[in-house]
Amino acid sequence: MKKQLIIATILSGVLAAPTLAEDKGLTMDGEFGFIFTTGNTDTTSASAGLSAKHELEKWSNEYLIEGLYKKDEINDVEQTSAQKFFASAQGNYKLENPNHRLFAFASYEDDRFSNFKYQGTLAGGWNQKLWEDEKSSFDYSIGPGYSFAEDQLGEDVSGVIVRGSLNYKWQISETSKFSQTFSTEVGSDNTKSRAESALSAQIAGGLSMKLSLKFDHNTDVNGGTKKLDTETAVTLVYSFF
């Protein structure tokens, strides 16, 4: 029930994004990467993502969906070595000063090879855009929330958290940009943190190439499970709007 509630919250926001008023304030990027190798080891690896931002008069909304899949075949033995899905949605309600907002956030992660069967978050609080100009922007969010999680042993490890996040963007030139995101969810049993550093360069029109480095860290994991997962990827990104 907890899992369905979080997924429904995220999907309702994602599906509503294209139909909201003032669609000229909507930007959307699709991302895809694929690797296929043959020989002594056959490997198939695919990653995909969809991110959107919708700027309205009273709301600034952000949506993200990411997926990763990897399959290896060694000596005719086939096995899945990575299978991960992540989705999040954040709505920021603008106050009298539009750089000051109240936010509501929801996320859901299903990583088959992590310490958890699933991890979900519902949180709310304060969001502030410290600056935004033609070259760069920076904003942060902080507030209380609740984490819904179950580990691979079937134990419920849900609990109250404090969530904080940072979002920095830098337009290096007309055709290249850098972005840095970071979030942490601090709880009594576990602290979950995510970060992504990305550099992208425009190839032609709305098509760009992106180099990214992602970190996913949990402080409390069962024996034999690593606390830190990293992902380095080169992907193609297409901007729809």
Image (cartoon, grey):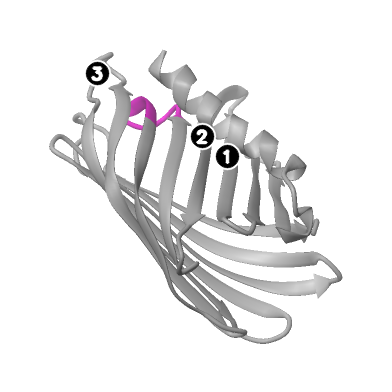
Bounds of the magenta span? 111-119
Residue ID at (46%, 56%):
214
Amino acid type indicated by mark 2: Lys
Residue ID at (67%, 87%):
173
> Is 95 colored magenta in this rendering?
no
Answer whether labels 1 and 2 touch (C-beta < 8 Å): yes
Mark earlier in primary sequence (1, 2):
1
- Density class for disc 1 (Cα within 10 Å; few <14, some 14-19, many ≥20) is some
Mark 1: which secondary structure? strand
Q: Position of 166 compared to 162: left or right?
A: right
Q: Which residue is mark 1?
A: 68
What is the x, y in percent for residue 164?
A: 31, 54
* Residue depth check, mark 3 versus mark 1: number of the one nearer the observer: 3
Residue ID at (72%, 44%):
20
Residue at the left extreme, as displayed: 188
Mark 3: which secondary structure? loop
Residue at the front extreme, as displayed: 96
Q: Which residue is mark 2?
A: 84
Q: Is residue 146 above or below residue 64?
A: above
Amino acid type indicated by mark 1: Leu
- Density class for disc 2 (Cα within 10 Å; few <14, some 14-19, many ≥20) is some
Q: Nearer the viewer, residue 127 or 204?
A: 127
Rounded to the nearest whole Å, what is the CA distance between mark 3 and mark 2?
20 Å
What is the x, y in percent for residue 215?
A: 39, 54
Q: Which residue is mark 3?
A: 156
What is the x, y in percent for residue 35?
A: 69, 47
Q: Quadrant of residue 148?
A: top left
Q: Position of 144 compared to 59: left or right?
A: left
Q: Is residue 18 above or below residue 116?
A: below
Residue ID at (76%, 73%):
202
Can residue 71 be seen from the camera position used here? Answer: no
Q: Is residue 141 above or below residue 121?
A: below
